Amino acid sequence: MAEEAKWYVIHTYSSYENAVSAAIMKAAENRRMTDHFLEIKIPMETVTEYTDAGEKTYERKLFPGYVFCKMILTDETWHMVHNIRGATGFVGSEGKAIPLTEQEIYDLGIEHREVVIGFEVGDTVKVVDGPLSGFLGVVEELDADNEKIRVMVSMFGRETPVDLNLDQVEENNTIQKTNLPP
């Protein structure tokens, strides 16, 4: 069921973000629909102001008037959110809720995912996807933020740099058995 969950943006009256967030969770709990609402966020940033009185640090909403909700959208959940006091509806066209794209989620910083790479510069990797599938190469550069990798692949007797996505390569687990006695 979690695969169907997507991030939606709910528009609220000014300064009602926290109340709407709490009311959605309470209503979901009362209706036994908590499995439809995975996460609710109000993105905040820490602001430090320097004035004559000194330094003042506080939290400020990045998107005033909006609440981000990772949920499974059904007719029942749509109506529930629309009936929350302070919520004016979903962001979308003609009353239809439009989920955020993966790029929008990444750009807005709503969801953070950690990229774990099992290899480093100088390691040998195997290309598992694309036209060079099956080729082995040596890692030249890693760009974890953009999930890119540059691999030197030997083609036609020449070393050629190839830029790939991280999901197109895997660790080379083959052991080279050269000069081993039988």
Image (cartoon, helix red, strand yellow):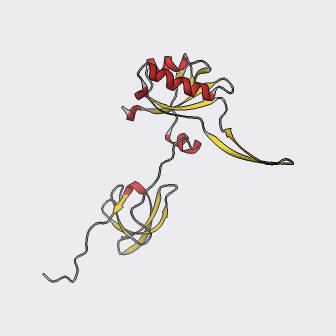
Front residue of 2/136: it is 2
Front residue of 159/7: it is 7
Which x, y percent locates residue 142?
48, 63
Which x, y percent locates residue 19?
60, 25
Q: Farthest residue to the right: give it.
A: 52
Q: Is residue 37 above or below residue 162?
A: above
Q: Indicate left or right for 55 with 182 as reference.
A: right
**Residue 68 in view:** yes
Q: Pick the quarter of the image with the N terminus.
A: top left
Residue at position x 60%, y 18% from top?
Answer: 85
Q: Is residue 43 above or below residue 13?
A: below
Q: Indicate left or right for 51 with 59 as reference.
A: right
Occupied quadrant, residue 38: top left
Which x, y percent locates residue 178?
23, 80
Residue at position x 22%, y 77% from top?
Answer: 177
Residue at position x 67%, y 32% from top?
Answer: 64
Q: Pick the quarter of the image with the C terminus.
A: bottom left
All told, the count of numbered labels is: 0
